[in-house]
Image (cartoon, rainbow, N blue to C red):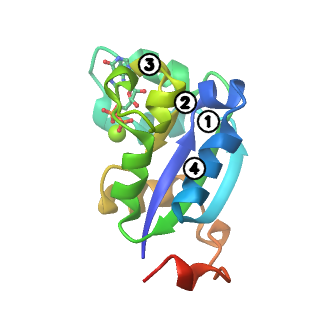
Amino acid sequence: MQRTLVLVKPDGVQRGLIGQVITRLENRGLRIVAAKFMQVSRELAETHYAIHKGKPFYDGLINYITSAPVMAMVWEGPDAVAAVRQTMGSTRPREAAPGTIRHDFALDVGRNLTHASDSPENGEAEIALWFKPHELVQWQREIDRWIFE
Ligand code: IDP
Ligand code: MG
């Protein structure tokens, strides 16, 4: 079972789309492990997006992610990293496939609603950055055997 960090970014929260994002991940069969609604500090934003430092959109990205609260979550499932990114759609919403969250709810790359880890290694690192170990819940769903082969 693989785990991944998911954020509903400030635009998703402001637009009342937290529920729709969660519903799509639940519908997919993924299992929620942790969630917290929080204001992102500049320090956390800069650590999380360190890889993008120096890029033209970096300052705007830090301002965007710290501009209002986010919903931070951990989800798990088989190949959860790839599965969640597939459900989110391409970074640029106008290039995202119909049926993906970014296609169905967004237009501009700087307002693309969600974050999802891009590799299993980054997933574990991002989970450790955003959550304390005791905030991650280990549990089984009654329906798991009908979703996980
Ligand atoms: P990802 O979120 O799909 O993994 P990344 O390339 O890691 O995409 O970029 C991180 C975030 O930075 C994007 O989700 C988006 O919010 C923002 N971003 C990326 N490229 C641009 C851009 O060209 N203009 C404005 N914002 C951008
Ligand atoms: Mg990324």
Sequence-earlier tag: 1 or 4: 4
As shown in the figure, which amino acid type bears the numbered disc 1?
Answer: Val
The residue drawn where x is 68% and y is 83% is 142
User: What element does badge 2 sit on?
Assistant: helix
Q: Is residue 81 above or below residue 38?
A: below
The residue drawn where x is 70% and y is 24% is 14
| Foreground residue among 62 and 36 | 36
Quick one: quadrant of the C terminus? bottom left
Q: Are circles 2 and 4 on residues that touch, CB within 8 Å?
A: no
Q: Which residue is mark 2?
A: 42
As shown in the figure, which amino acid type bears the numbered disc 4?
Answer: Arg
Q: Are circles 2 and 3 on residues that touch, CB within 8 Å?
A: no
Gap between marks 4 and 3, in whole Å? 22 Å
Task: Single out the mark in the foreground, 2 or 4.
Answer: 4
Q: Which residue is mark 1?
A: 40
Mark 1 Cα-neighbour bin, 10 Å: few <14, some 14–19, many ≥20? many
Task: Single out the mark in the foreground, 3 or 1.
Answer: 3
As shown in the figure, which amino acid type bears the numbered disc 3?
Answer: Gly
As shown in the figure, which amino acid type bears the numbered disc 2?
Answer: Arg
Q: Which residue is mark 3?
A: 110
Task: Single out the mark in the foreground, 2 or 3.
Answer: 3
Q: Which residue is mark 4?
A: 24
